[in-house]
């Protein structure tokens, strides 16, 4: 049996060439007096590289509260569907410092962590359910499943004055 030895330098260079967009994540820093919004539109080029990804556009709006829980709304548009889907729920900091948000009515949830470049990474816990509109139980809904090449979304911070949600007391 022939053994191949790869020099350590080659491994280091290979690691530097690999695109690792989530390597430098840290807890999201949300000031208690400000709302926080994050958003991204995914280009056709990006979607071609990730053919299982269904989300074309995503926005997260966090309303700061004086209680231990904040409220967040997630909005999304999907490939091939012009409707706006959204849903919301409570958010809290977990033991590791990640912001965890649960979607109301067993709609799944996600975590947010901040990258060194100021953008955030949204990771579905398993799924995120969003609905088209209204409170009707028969309303159309879509799910963002981590298993569908949607395990992480990089979103950019939006100026606070453009956030739709307001602080909650």
Image (cartoon, grey):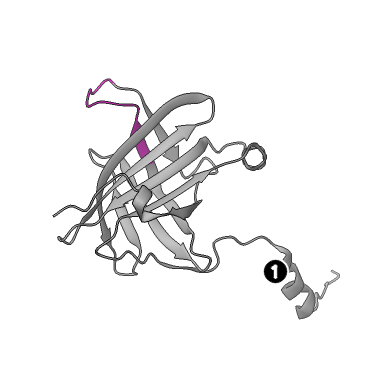
Instruction: Give the main secondary structure of the magenta stretch.
Output: loop
**Counting other residues with Cα less than 10 Å from the Cα at mark 1, is it few (<14), some (14-19), or many (20 or more)?**
few
Look at mark 1 in the image and give the residue it sits on.
15
Q: Nearer the viewer, residue 84 or 100?
A: 84
Q: Residue at x 48, y 64 (%)?
A: 118
Residue 132 point in image, percent of width and height: 35, 27
The magenta span reads 128-138
Magenta-span inclusion, residue 12: no
**Residue 10 placement, left or right of 96:** right
Specify the quadrant that holds the C terminus. bottom left
Q: Name the quadrant containing residue 5.
A: bottom right
Q: Secondary structure at mark 1?
A: helix
Image position of 101 with respect to 94: above or below: above
Magenta-span inclusion, residue 133: yes
Specify the quadrant that holds the N terminus. bottom right
Q: Residue at x 55, y 38 (%)?
A: 53
Residue 41 point in image, percent of width and height: 53, 42
Q: Residue at x 30, y 55 (%)?
A: 35
């Amino acid at each position: 049996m022939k053994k191949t030895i790869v020099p350590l330098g080659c491994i280091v260079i290979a690691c530097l060439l690999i695109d690792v967009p989530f390597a430098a994540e840290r807890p999201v820093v949300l000031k208690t007096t400000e709302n926080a919004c994050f958003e991204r539109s995914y280009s056709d080029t990006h979607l071609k590289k990730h053919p299982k990804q269904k989300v074309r556009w995503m926005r997260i709006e966090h309303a700061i509260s004086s209680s231990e829980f904040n409220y967040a709304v997630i909005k999304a548009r999907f490939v091939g569907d012009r409707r706006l889907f959204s849903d919301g729920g409570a958010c809290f900091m977990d033991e590791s410092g990640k912001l965890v948000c649960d979607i109301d009515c067993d709609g799944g949830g996600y975590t947010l962590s901040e990258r060194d470049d100021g953008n955030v990474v949204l990771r579905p816990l398993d799924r995120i359910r969003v609905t088209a509109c209204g409170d009707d139980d028969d309303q159309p809904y879509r799910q963002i499943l981590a298993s569908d090449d949607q395990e992480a979304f990089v979103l950019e911070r939006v100026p606070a004055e453009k956030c739709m949600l307001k602080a909650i007391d």
